[in-house]
Amino acid sequence: MLTPHFNAVIRRDGQWWIGWIEEIPGVNSQGATRDELIANLRDALAEAIELNREDARRAAGESYEEVVIQP
């Protein structure tokens, strides 16, 4: 199975680094350094994916099937 990857758009903005995950609206972060920003984006992405999973499972109800979809 392929490991999914996501693209981040990042830039320096004054004293801060800011960035956005292209594929998932609303996943963005900032950091005092480039490395901190990337770590923060990883955390924000993981949290968003887990919340989306929980929402999908709740919406599906009690009886559902999970299927892996690869792009």
Image (tube, grey):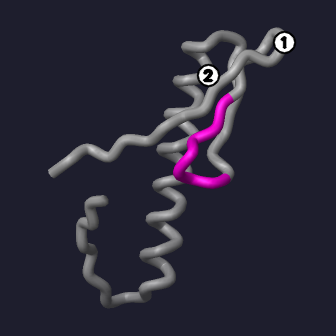
Q: Residue at x 81, y 9 (%)?
A: 15
Residue at image position (55%, 13%) is 35
Where residue 61 sits in the image (x, y, percent)? 43, 88
Label 2 neighbour load within 10 Å: few <14, some 14-19, many 20+: many
Where disc 2 sits, the SS reads helix
Q: In which image quadrant can residue 62 be found?
A: bottom left
In this picture, is 6 found above or below 40?
below
Q: Residue at x 64, y 38 (%)?
A: 20
Q: Secondary structure at mark 1?
A: loop
Q: Position of residue 64 (x, y in %)?
A: 31, 85
| Amino acid type for the residue under numbered disc 2 | Leu
- Asked if residue 52 lies left or right of residue 27, the reply is left
Which residue is painted at 55% across and 34% down in the image?
8
Name the residue that disc number 1 marks. Answer: 14
Q: Is residue 48 left or right of residue 62?
A: right
Q: Is residue 6 magenta?
A: no
Label 1 to label 2: alpha-carbon separation: 14 Å
Residue at the far left: name it. Answer: 1
Where in the figure is residue 33, as x and y percent of width and height?
65, 10
Is residue 19 depicted above or below 44 in this figure? above
Horizontal and vertical percent for residue 41?
Answer: 57, 33
Q: Earlier in the sequence, mark 1 or mark 2?
A: 1
- Residue indicated by mark 2: 37
Q: Which residues are magenta?
A: 19-25
Does the magenta-highlighted stretch encompass residue 24?
Answer: yes
Residue type of the residue flagged with mark 1: Gly
